[in-house]
Image (cartoon, helix red, strand yellow):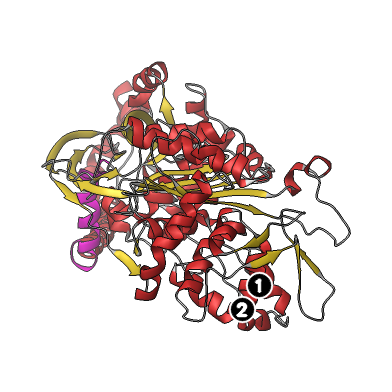
Amino acid sequence: MALDICAFAQRQAAYGNPLGRMMLNIPLRDYFRETRIFNSRLMIVAGAIGLLVIVILFRLIYLQLINQHHYTTLSKANSIRPIPIPPARGLILDRNGTVLAQNYPVYTLEITPHQVKDMKALIKTLSGIIKITDYDKKIFYRLIRRHSRYENIPLRTHLNDAEAARIASYQTHLNGVELQARLQRHYPLGALTVHFIGYVGRINEEDTKKIKKSLYHGTQHIGKLGLERYYEKILLGRVGVKQVESNAHGRHLRTLKRLAPKAGQNLHLHIDAGMQAYAERAMGKRRGAVIALNPRTGGILTFVSTPTYNPNPFVNGIDTKSYKALLDDPDKPLINRALSGRYAPGSTIKPFLALGALSLEEFNPKRQVYCPGYFYLPGSRHRFRDWKKTGHGSVNLNDAIVQSCDVYFYQLAVMLGIDRIKKFLNIFGFGYKTGIDMPDEVAGLVPSPEWSKRRGINWALGDTVVTGIGQGPLLVTPLQLASAVATLANRGVRMRPTLVYATEDPGSKQYKLVRNKANSELPAGFKEKLPEIITSMTNVVHDRRGTGIRIGWNAPYKIAGKTGTAQVISIGQKEKYDAKKIAERLRDHALFIAFAPVENPQIAVAVIVENGGHGSSAAAPIARKLMDFYLLNQPAFE
């Protein structure tokens, strides 16, 4: 049929028929060939689709079966996120309820690193909104290295209201950025309390090795010094948690579950903040320490170390320049002199040696010793000088304590020997830590021939002589001196010095008293002779010959005390000590220990004024002011 049509068209074209010419232009199609091409292409597409289906199936098997647990966890984490709720840190208050360490809310700009693709770009954007210093960035990147990328890391703290408002207005366009209201530790009295309260600071790498990380989720701070460090577990509290639902950008949609945190316990101290401030004013710009405590309980009323420094900049990290200034300060304000300063006790050691001598049957306290103003060891030409150049004449034990005769105690030291001197001083706690509820206490030093031998030096009899007047290698802390004189006041019972009086549960408001315990008691032989020493120490203050007579004048109560002066540098045999010609930092230290009232002691005091000169003129008046403040102006506490 097809051939007939073609022949017909050719004949029509030959006769000039246009239909024929038009039909000659119709192309011929090979349907069988086209069908084969279409089927082959269809097979290729089908194969490709089949291959993709196989790949997808394998991927689904991998996701749903092989690695199902991992991706399920990630999926849930993206939609439901647990957020730790840090607890409020416990407060610290003085005996009268004055707040010494508190928490106050501050705005904090925080970033969750895992939600941020370009951290540098984000911080640059934030820097255009609020001020972000290079120090802020340095601390931020340091914290990122120490914490999980899923945790909120603070970039800036203490945002003011205007800065917080600007961040809030831009927050919807800034993935990973959160504006939080956090509780910030603050010390309202600043430098006045730093040496016993200490401060909190950011958790560093060393801290992370010691702590249980789950207890610190949501908080970046930990106690670094003082009570903040010693009572860290009590002050910290228990972390809470809330589960929030988030969208793909990490924005919180709603809170699903919340476990409230438990606030840390409050600490109530024996410390009197008013008395603390009074003692610090009495010290003025002088370097030194003042410790006052209740001898019956061991409760510390005043704990002063001067100079001081403000702890608040340390909470979020003090800048390098400011910290270097504190380190380079020649007055060394960072040193806690009351707790870890080691000083030669000078003549304040004499009552304790005298009590030890009185416990010996062979010792006669009424025996007269002549003091010409100097002392020689047999066969030696070295002169051990008395503080009084002309000497004291004939003195017995009472006279030697009242007038602080060095020559008497030179001879007493030779008679006792260094082994018994060490034994007697150890009984009062010298050479040991007192056990106060603070970290970093030092033990002082009571020397011995064995100690000297370990240092490669032979012990000489002259070393024993100078130890008898509290010089040489003998070193004590102000806290040890206060504890020792409190032992005399408490009639031989040595209580452990303590700062915390009670703990308080902030929820129930229930108090739990801290029951203090005695470190030790003096031997019976010491207790029996104790009244004689107390009488002599009372005469130091109230006898007209006493070295402390200045503070005893017109006192409405009886004071028992002992002055002390400790050399800082050695003076040659032919040289004379002239304070006016010696540099201020090379002058003698001034010391004073006391308790009052003698009949019913309620306060014991130890004062050290570095380079103050004489204990009677520099240290004793400070002690009198504190005793007046406590005994005459303050209501009873315990």
Left/right placement of residue 112 relative to residue 638 reads right
| Residue 268, quarter of picture | top left
Which of 138/235 is in front? 235
SS for callout 2: helix
Amino acid under label 2?
Met
Residue shown at 34% from the left, 74% from the top:
524
The three-letter amino acid code for the residue at tag 1 is Gln
Residue annotated with mark 2: 415
Going 26% across and 48% down the picture, which residue do you hit? Answer: 501
User: Is residue 462 visible in the rendered structure shown here?
Assistant: yes
Residue 99: x and y in percent read 32, 33
Image side of residue 430 versus residue 415, left or right: left
Q: Give how far across and how far down residue 47 sits, in percent.
A: 27, 60
- Under circle 1, the secondary element is helix
> Which residue is located at x 49 percent, y 44 percent?
542
* Residue 379 against residue 187 in the figure, above or below: below
Residue 21 among those drawn in magenta: no
Quadrant of residue 186 within the rendered picture: top left
The answer to whether marks 2 and 1 mark residues whose Cβ atoms lie closer than 8 Å is: yes
Q: Is residue 479 above or below residue 379?
A: above
- Magenta span has 82? yes
Q: Residues within 10 Å of mark 1 (few under 14, many from 20)?
A: some
Outermost residue, right direction?
574
The span picked out in magenta is 64-88
Q: Kindly identify which residue carries mark 1.
A: 411
In the image, taking residue 504 as reference, residue 229 lies left or right, namely right
- Give x and y (percent) for residue 310: 51, 35
> Can residue 200 be seen here?
no
